[in-house]
Amino acid sequence: MRESEERYQHLVHMLPDGLIVVLEDNIVFANQAMLTMLGISNFDDIIGDPINKFIHPEFMERFPAMINYLILEANPSTFTYYELLRLDQQVIEVEMRAVAVKFDGKNAVQLIIHDITKQKRMEASLLEKEYLYKSLMENVVAGVFVGLRDKIVYANPYLAEMYGYTVEEMYAISINDLMDQDEINTHKSKILRGMGIGLSQFPIKSKGIKKDGSRIYLEGNSTVIMFNGELSLLGTVQDVTPKREKEKLLMENAKLYQKIIKFVPEPIVMSDHGIVLYANKLALEVLGIESEAKIIGTSVFEFIHQSHHALTLEKMHLIMSTDEATPFEERVLIRTDGKLLDVEVSSIRINNYLGKDVMLSVIRDLTDRKRSEEVLIRSEKLSAIGQLAAGVAHEIRNPLTALKGFTQLLSSKYPENPHYFSIMANEIDRITLIVNEFMTLAKPHFANYRSEPLEPILQSVLSLLETQAILINVELKVCFDHTRPSIFCNVDQLKQVFLNIIKNALEAMPQGGEVVVTVASLEDGFAHIRIIDGGPGIPEELISKIGEPFLTTKEKGTGLGIMISNRIIEAHKGTLQISSVMNEGTVVEIMLPVEDQLTIGLG
């Protein structure tokens, strides 16, 4: 019996719940769990104490009735909520069960007490968090939803209002009522693919269908969660319809700008902090760019010569601080083919282009203007030289005749010194040549014009120079296209031009080589004559000056030949251009209007 009692007491003390025996309102037994619960360290500190000492005052009055109820209750597992006081007067919440027992042969009550203080605190905390989350979800300025099996199982009021429904109505409809099926399928595919590679966040960009059938644009984020044991989608979205409408309006305004700029008959570029946003067709042609896509996003400084970078940057800051357009200023641009281009640029600030202030620049190609200025300057030089030549050449000819005659006379009188007289005769001939060229400049060029085929004119010049070409081992090649154009011209003057230029080509190749002459009549109404040699070429710094009087690369040249040729070609309403690459050769290109084109122009 003693062993059984000891074993029983050991088990009682090992129980996790508190156990206490009350006899005539006094405590006669308590297990270790009960002592710990009440904050008592010694068993003797509780035996004999009245039970009321540990009952919360608010529960004191009903304690006897509750004990009697529990004893009489048929189901001994019934627990009742109660509050007790620890020895330090801290309140503990418990669930209590009472059972009638015998103690020392007397009727007593055994109380089994389960401490639920932590549980209650946890429940309270959970309730607080639930309230907090619910309050947050219902008051956040964003639509919040949980989707499960094509249904909305949670929607906050903001989302419902966004769609024009009540929360209850949201629960009753399908996701298909809120979004197009194609968009639903797209989102599902993205989520499944993303989950397969470990993604947890999935952005939302879609169009929603409101209750009244109108569309709204939604943007937000979502994540996959477990809800009621199933995979669900938790998401937050914002109605960005006003933003999208503003973007659409800005885009329409930008397109309108571009349409206007596209048909403006000048090259135009729009940029933001030096980055190209748009360039019209003429600007692309100026820069030598094939398509708009190849310039958008690039820096404008890629097309501006480095010497103008600092000034351009300074002007950009000035432009963006004022509404006034800058005056046209000269710049040097670099085309994609590497060629330099003289232009003038004027810029102005444009407000609210795609929502920001940008710079619009108008570009004017100065090539034709500078060429016209050069032609005018050259024409003025020719005119001045012509006027001078008319007077000077006449005055020089008579003394030259006398000098030549006396030189011949003296050479026959003093045959022992022929060398000196030979030099004098050569120099007199040289002066005579210069005088004759002066006279050519002074002659009018507007008489004896008639329609003549170009081929016989060139062939006659080539026949004259063929012997010279053979002597210096140069091959003359000529190629005419099928058109065989006719020119309204002065034949002798054109022969003089071709003679000058082809002779120059031959003289540039004393070691032999090849001179190629090609003639083609193109759709622009001009005959194109190209004379190409394989000589040493002309230095770049002299190319632009070729045609000025007395500028020549030949030892005994006067520089008047090209000047005379230029004047003759200009009188025929044509152009003469020279290009050269050192150590590769020189190309002279002459363009003359064919007879029909000239006739139309004169008419």
Image (spheres, rainbow, N blue to C red):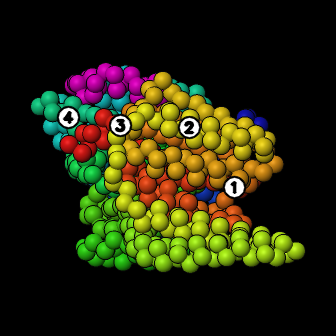
Q: CA distance from mark 3 to mark 4?
A: 75 Å
Which of the pair 461/571 is nearer the observer?
A: 461
Q: CA distance from mark 4 to mark 1?
A: 72 Å
Q: CA distance from mark 2 to mark 3?
A: 17 Å
Q: Residue furthest front?
A: 413
- For disc 4, the marked residue is 215
Relative to 25, does residue 592 appear above or below in the rendering? above
Asked if the stretch drawn in magenta spans residue 171, the answer is: yes
Secondary structure of the residue carrying tag 3 is strand
Amino acid at the residue labelled 3: Ser
- Given this view, does label 1 or label 3 mark the residue nearer the observer? 3
- Given this view, does label 2 or label 4 mark the residue nearer the observer? 2
Q: Which mark is first along the chain, 4 or 2?
A: 4
Q: Which mark is first along the chain, 1 or 2?
A: 2
Q: Tell me the tag on residue 460.
A: 2
Q: Which mark is first along the chain, 3 or 2?
A: 3
- For disc 1, the marked residue is 537
Amino acid at the residue labelled 2: Ser
Q: Are marks 2 and 3 in contact (CB under 8 Å)?
A: no
Residue sitting at x 25%, y 33%: 208
Report the quarter where the C terminus lies. top left
Residue sitting at x 45%, y 28%: 484
- For disc 3, the marked residue is 451
Q: Are marks 4 and 1 in contact (CB under 8 Å)?
A: no
Q: CA distance from mark 2 to mark 4?
A: 82 Å
